[in-house]
Amino acid sequence: MNIQSTLFISALGLSALPLAQAGEFEDFGRVTRVHPRVEQIRQPREECRTEYVQVPVQQPSQARSAGGSIIGGIAGALIGNQVGGGNGRAAATAAGAIAGAVVGDRIDNDGRVVNQAPMVQEQAVRQCRIVEAYESRTTGYDVTYEYRGHSYTTLMARDPGQRVRLRISVEPEQYQ
């Protein structure tokens, strides 16, 4: 080895001497076990579904008119009165009045029926309710590691992997 190399190594060693005397340094420990801490957190949520129900539909008002029956009844009675004589005339008048009222009603109301079946329509009904739900969250990790023959356990925010970085602090004992 030449003199320059020797001087350089000596200078490097002397400059590192204060670091060897430092009270704090970093090292690594071997991780032996990692166990996540899991917490169950209550998270109520709304659950909805849509059902289809049959509801009656309001039909437009179709009021039946009585005018056709009245006019038809009078016309039928007049025609029936022209037929027959005596009691037969009275019967023909009554029959003409009834027949005329029926024909007049059908003509006036276009054959509309009074008691129509009610119309129904499907309508969507949304029903919602609050359901208790639980969510699992990892709040940290219990990490067990070995360092220089001793086993230590600590809580960490994340999984450190196979080894854990340690900050080693050296202090003299106060009460010797």
Image: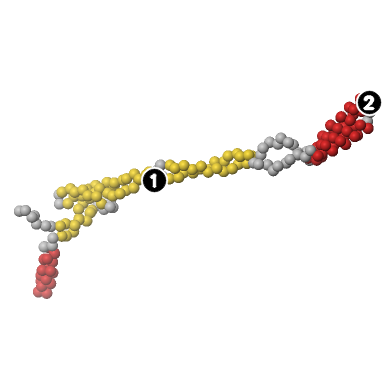
**Secondary element at image label 2:** loop
Horizontal and vertical percent position of residue 93: 89, 30
Q: Is residue 172 left or right of residue 157?
A: left
Residue 22, by quadrant, is bottom left
Where does label 2 land, which residue? Answer: 86
Q: Is residue 168 left or right of residue 44?
A: left
Q: Is residue 28 left or right of residue 110?
A: left
Nearer to the camera, 42 or 35: 42
Which mark, residue 155? none
Q: Foreground mark, 1 or 2?
A: 2
Q: Is 174 situated above or below 35?
A: below
Horizontal and vertical percent position of residue 48: 49, 44
Residue at the left extreme of this rendering: 176
Q: Name the residue at 46% across, 42% down.
A: 129
Residue 99, by quadrant, is top right
Q: Name the residue at 91% across, 25% down.
A: 87
Nearer to the camera, 96 or 4: 96
Horizontal and vertical percent position of residue 34: 26, 48
Between the C-alphas of marks 1 and 2, the distance is 95 Å
Residue type highlighted by circle 2: Gly
Nearer to the camera, 115 or 148: 115
Q: Name the residue at 53% across, 43% down.
A: 126
How crowded is the residue under tag 2: few (<14 C-alpha within 10 Å), some, or many (20+)?
A: few
Residue type highlighted by circle 1: Gln
Q: Is 119 situated above or below 170?
A: above
Nearer to the camera, 154 or 8: 154
Where does label 1 land, which residue? Answer: 43
